[in-house]
Image (cartoon, coloured by chain):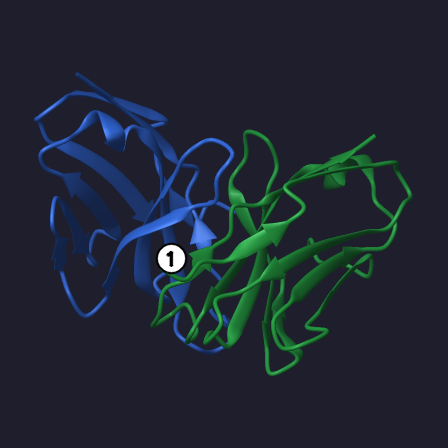
Amino acid sequence: DQQVKQNSPSLSVQEGRISILNCDYTNSMFDYFLWYKKYPAEGPTFLISISSIKDKNEDGRFTVFLNKSAKHLSLHIVPSQPGDSAVYFCAASGAGGTSYGKLTFGQGTILTVHP
Amino acid sequence: EPEVTQTPSHQVTQMGQEVILRCVPISNHLYFYWYRQILGQKVEFLVSFYNNEISEKSEIFDDQFSVERPDGSNFTLKIRSTKLEDSAMYFCASSSDWGGTDTQYFGPGTRLTVL
């Protein structure tokens, strides 16, 4: 199932700089997108989401951009901090129909922020 | 801040044995989910549950799996006869609405090891 793809398995960034994590999807029925952060031995922690009717959503240091025509979304973290080091998952869900809230996840990107 | 809790944190069982994984969703949430993550792989949807019924299930969720909300607070996943390939992290999640318009909050997970 490759409906949601994160093509970069890892990203390394200097503290204070911008981190950009990317996600692509193939299913045009997806209309809600989320980013989760995960530390080892913990569950995914919700970060930020965006509905398909928007192209940008911002929450503090985190901004998610959605390009529907390209079926692409990205998460920007500015400024990056060492505590941001974790695995970041992109997830998507479709509206109603036969998809009752099921989230489809990408493979994850390991972000390392160096002091 | 309300959170989803799961017990046990680690369960070791012999192949062919039954296991029950327990979850306490966030108290005012109405929609419940189970996901799993096999080591090194994506987080995968198993089942969604609402109003005491399964709403959607994946191909993974075969007759060996069942879910139940035995009382007003717990949500359980039962695997009747465990196989080696059931070894994974199992995450419970809950939301106040379908994941298409609301956010799913995840528990810390139960690591299931089948020997």
Q: Can the viewer see residue A98 in this picture?
A: no
* Quarter location, residue B74: bottom right
The residue under the point 41% across, 76% down is B97
* Viewer-side residue, A12 vs B92: B92
**Which residue is most to the top?**
A115
Dot 1: element: strand
The residue under the point 41% across, 34% down is A39
**Type of residue at label 1?**
Ala
* Viewer-side residue, B11 vs A96: B11
Mark 1 Cα-neighbour bin, 10 Å: few <14, some 14–19, many ≥20: many
What residue is shown with label 1? A92
Chain B, chosen colour in render: green
**Side of A93 where B53 appears, left or right:** right
Chain A, chosen colour in render: blue
The residue under the point 91% across, 43% down is B16
Q: With respect to residue B72, does B60 lie above or below?
A: above
User: In which quadrant is the N terminus of chain B drawn?
Assistant: bottom left
Q: Position of residue B15 (x, y in %)?
A: 88, 38
* Quarter location, residue A107: top left
Q: Position of residue A83 (x, y in %)?
A: 25, 30
Q: With respect to residue B17, does B106 lie above or below?
A: below
**Which residue is most to the front?**
B1
